[in-house]
């Protein structure tokens, strides 16, 4: 199985998210049976989005983009894994934008992964070379079952820049990540993936799929990525 994971980041309000579904529905991409499509949404969109894709029978699995590192309790404003458990099957943790803008640490990411797994949500752990070893070590130290996680190699220089990594180079690093994890978990690539280059990444022997930011926002671009994989 290969995976295409969309990450809308802080884009699309509720109305816009429902219009996006109409767009995908109209385009009728040929969802390949051996590729799972996961879309990580803003918290505010998830419930209504779930209802609408179920009504229209669109085979997209929903995810969140972050979760609190704290258990339920007196933490005003936090969205806990327990809350997300009723809504999503996946959740991104440790995206480099959260490390940059919210000072997230590898320890916090490990705590988030633990809480997600306790609530039957698959953590999608983002990694880049400067903190790759530290993050994986932190997961093991927190007794995280890495076989229940997904991992994404996301070189910061490739995110949102239109300059993707060379697929062979990306494959080399995903292979290294897989080795550090005893090859028990899927390892994906993320960074400026488009309909034109997605196949060159997904066809690599050690890349299990892609994480797509910018080109997940427009139905035509996202459908183009799905159709490129048929
Ligand atoms: C991302 O933010 O995780 C990402 C991969 O973005 P983009 O596809 O825009 O590079």
Image: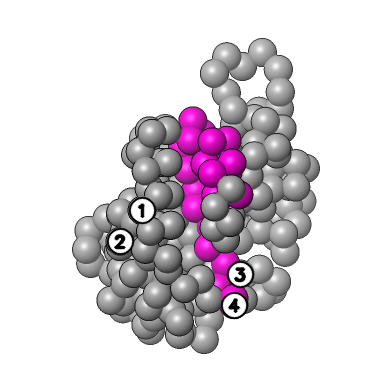
Which is more toward the observer, 208 or 96?
Answer: 208
For disc 4, does the CB lie below 8 Å from ligand 1?
Answer: no
Spatial CA distance of label 3 from label 1 is 30 Å
Kindly indicate whether the residue at mark 2 contacts the one at mark 1 (C-beta within 8 angstroms): yes
From the image, tell me which residue sits under label 4. 34
Kindly indicate whether the residue at mark 3 contacts the one at mark 2 (C-beta within 8 angstroms): no
Q: Nearer the viewer, mark 3 or mark 4?
A: 4
From the image, tell me which residue sits under label 2. 220
The x, y position of residue 75, in whole percent, is 61, 16
SS at badge 3: loop
Spatial CA distance of label 1 from label 2 is 8 Å
Residue drawn 75% across the image and 57% down it = 145
Q: Is residue 217 visible?
A: yes
Please give left or right for residue 31 compared with residue 225 in the image. Answer: right
Kindly indicate whether the residue at mark 4 contacts the one at mark 3 (C-beta within 8 angstroms): no
The x, y position of residue 7, in whole percent, is 43, 51
Which is more toward the observer, 85 or 68?
Answer: 85
The range drawn in magenta is 33-54
Which of pointers 2 and 3 lies earlier in the amino acid sequence?
A: 3
Residue drawn 76% across the image and 51% down it = 143
Spatial CA distance of label 2 from label 4 is 21 Å
Which of pointers 2 and 4 lies earlier in the amino acid sequence?
A: 4
Image disc number at residue 23: 1
Spatial CA distance of label 3 from label 4 is 14 Å
């Amino acid at each position: 199985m290969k995976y295409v994971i969309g990450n809308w980041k802080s884009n699309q309000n509720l109305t816009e998210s429902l219009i996006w579904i109409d767009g995908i529905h109209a385009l009728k991409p040929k969802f390949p049976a051996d590729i799972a499509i996961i879309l990580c949404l803003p918290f505010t969109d998830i419930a209504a989005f779930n209802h609408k894709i179920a009504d229209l029978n669109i085979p997209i699995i929903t995810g969140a983009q972050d979760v609190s590192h704290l258990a339920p309790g007196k933490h005003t404003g936090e969205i806990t894994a327990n809350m997300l458990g009723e809504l999503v099957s996946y959740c991104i943790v440790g995206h480099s934008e959260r490390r940059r803008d919210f000072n997230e640490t590898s320890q916090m990411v490990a705590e988030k992964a633990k809480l997600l797994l306790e609530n039957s949500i698959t953590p999608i752990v983002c990694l880049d070379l400067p903190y790759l070893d530290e993050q994986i070590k932190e997961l093991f130290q927190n007794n995280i079952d890495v076989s229940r996680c997904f991992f994404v190699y996301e070189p910061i220089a490739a995110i949102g820049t239109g300059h993707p990594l060379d697929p062979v180079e990306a494959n080399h690093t995903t292979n290294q990540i897989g080795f550090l994890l005893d090859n028990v978990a899927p390892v994906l690539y993320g960074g400026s993936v488009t309909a034109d280059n997605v196949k060159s990444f997904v066809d690599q022997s050690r890349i299990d799929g892609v994480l797509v930011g910018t080109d997940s926002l427009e139905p035509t671009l996202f459908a183009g990525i799905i159709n490129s994989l048929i």
